[in-house]
Each structure stands twice: as C-alpha cells, then as structure tokens.
Image (cartoon, helix red, strand yellow):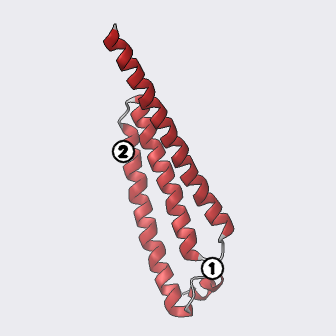
Amino acid sequence: MELKKKLYILNIIYMINLEYLLQFFGLLFIIGCIGICLKRENCLLALISIELMYLGIIFSFIVFAKLQNLTYPYIWSLMILIIAACESAIGLGILVTLYKKSKSVSFYYYRTLHG
C-alpha cells in the first residue's frame, strides 16, 4: 500500500510539471503572436516570431504525446520542424536578397524584389 501511495504522489508531481510546461509553451506561442503584431515593418523580427510560434506548437504536441502515451504526435512534431526549417531557409534567402538590394529589412522595400 505504501508503494502505491508513493507512485500516486510521483504521478501527481509529473502531471503538475507537464501542466507548467504547457503553460510555458502557450506563452511562447503568445509571445510570437505579439511579436508579429507589434513589429510588422521588420522582416527579421517577423521570422523570429513565427519560429517562436512553431516551437510553442511543436513542444505542446510533444507534451500531449507524453501525457497520453502516444507516438504519432512525435512524428507530426518532426514534420512541423522540417517545414519550419525549410520556411526559415527560404525566408532568410529572401531577406538577404532584400538587404542587398535596399540596405534595409523592412517590409516596405519588399515590393522592389519583383522579378
């Protein structure tokens, strides 16, 4: 009976930590949303804010997978991470081209890149 109580207490501590993690990753997502809303003119800060949002989503998937003992959220998290890396590479390539052409990373000068 004593071992059962200890395992129950450890399980409660484990669940509390995962709830704090979910709150933290939700906060990461909200910080990313706020970053996009407040710094609309800067391309680099918008890309960083989008990456923060991706990380909040990915880690929330992982925490939910841990809570429910599932494996497929890990696969979805890996897919989202791959898509985020591709998006960052393309976005940074466009950003470098924009900086070479206009010496600024503002969305205002993005119109000068038409081909």
Q: Which residue is mark 2?
A: 75
Location of the C terminus by quadrant is bottom right
Q: How many marks?
A: 2
Q: Amino acid at mark 2?
A: Ile
SS under mark 2: helix
The percent coordinates of residue 17 (x first, y second) are 46, 36
Instruction: Reply above or below: 5 against 64.
Output: above
Task: Measure the alpha-carbon separation of dots 1 and 2.
Answer: 34 Å
Q: Which residue is mark 1?
A: 107
- Residue at image x 51%, y 36%? 19
Instruction: Reply above or below: 67 against 76.
Output: above
Disc on res. 4: none
Q: Is residue 3 shown left or right of residue 112?
A: left
- Residue at image x 48%, y 44%? 60
Q: In the picture, residue 1 is in which quadrant?
A: top left
Query: Of callouts 1 and 2, which one flags the residue occurring earlier in the amino acid sequence?
Result: 2
